Image (cartoon, grey):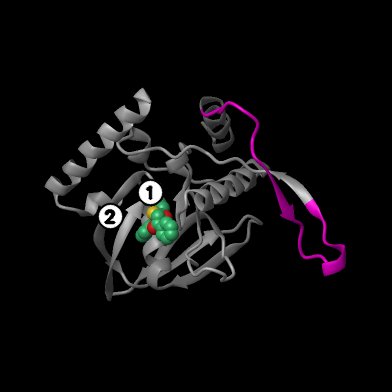
Amino acid sequence: MDCAEECQNEDRAQAKSGTPDRVPVRSSPLPELTFTFIWARMTIRPILIHPDPRLKTVAAPVGEITEEIRTLAEDMLQTMYDAPGIGLAAPQIGRSIRLLVMDCVKEEGATPRPLVLVDPEITWSSEEAATYEEGCLSIPDQYADVTRPAEVEVTWTDLEGKPQTERFTGLWATCVQHEIDHLDGKLFIDYLKPLKRQMITRKMAKLKRERARA
Ligand code: K1U
Ligand code: ZN
């Protein structure tokens, strides 16, 4: 099954009731006095909760950037900001494709920096490691220290189909590695000791049962 087919199938499977959110987006770049608002369709997608086999699957390359991929990326950014989170990978919304979004600008009032990475690859990792307390939108309210390379170089394709390369440090480096792990079917709890991982998994299974009953 190619990516377009896979996306369509998932769309049907994930069809939500109600009208999608309609959000005014400033079309840019336009002169200040003439800026206009266009109506863009952006949908907040449900985020899968662990344990779910779709979070353990290696995602397929995206390849060609279609309008559908652009819409999906917009929806993922909207879903990430709404959660709120600093990253989101396509498998977390049930799409087994190598697409992720992130924005690690957390300071209030600072300019956001939404990034969309298609088919990202880590091409270099530092010897130096860094430990961050990680969370995951698919494992709500659970946090744990994870040690990863402090700096990574990543190449990807942007939404215009142009190749990009960037060296990430600090929280950006942690986040991009966490998100690429999602594309490889790996969760941050896979870095923890088995007992702690099992404890979190049981809590999440209980949470899912309770949510299903509500
Ligand atoms: O992939 C995800 O589940 C998103 C995750 C990303 C992440 C967090 C921490 C370290 C590495 C990767 C999140 O965004 S969890 C929520 C979160 O960290 C946060 C939420 C609001 C403000 C600031 C951070
Ligand atoms: Zn996560």
Q: Is residue 31 magenta?
A: yes
Q: CA distance from mark 1 to mark 2?
A: 16 Å
Per the image, the residue denoted by label 1 is 182
Residue type at the position of mark 2: Tyr
Name which of mark 1 and mark 2 comes first in the sequence.
2
Residue at the spot x=56%, y=25% of the render?
12
| Residue 203 image position (x, y, % from top left) | 23, 38
Which image quarter holds the C terminus? top left
SS for dot 1: helix
Of helix, strand and loop, which mostly describes the magenta segment? loop
**What residue span does the magenta drawing correspond to?**
14-37
Measured as percent of width and height from the top left, residue 25 is found at: 72, 53
Q: Is residue 31 visible?
A: no
Give residue 197's position: percent from left, percent from top: 19, 46
**Is residue 41 among the parts visible in the rendering?**
yes
Q: Is residue 114 above or below residue 54?
A: below
- Image quadrant, ligand 1: bottom left
Q: Residue at x 32, y 39 (%)?
A: 50
In the rendered image, residue 93, in percent from the top left (x then y), is placed at: 47, 39
Ligand 2 closer than 8 Å to label 1 CB: yes
Kind of residue at disc 1: His
Q: Quadrant of residue 198?
A: top left
In the image: residue 150, left or right of residue 7: left
Q: Read off the residue under disc 2.
A: 143
State yes or no: Cβ of the residue under disc 2 lies below 8 Å from any atom of ligand 1: no
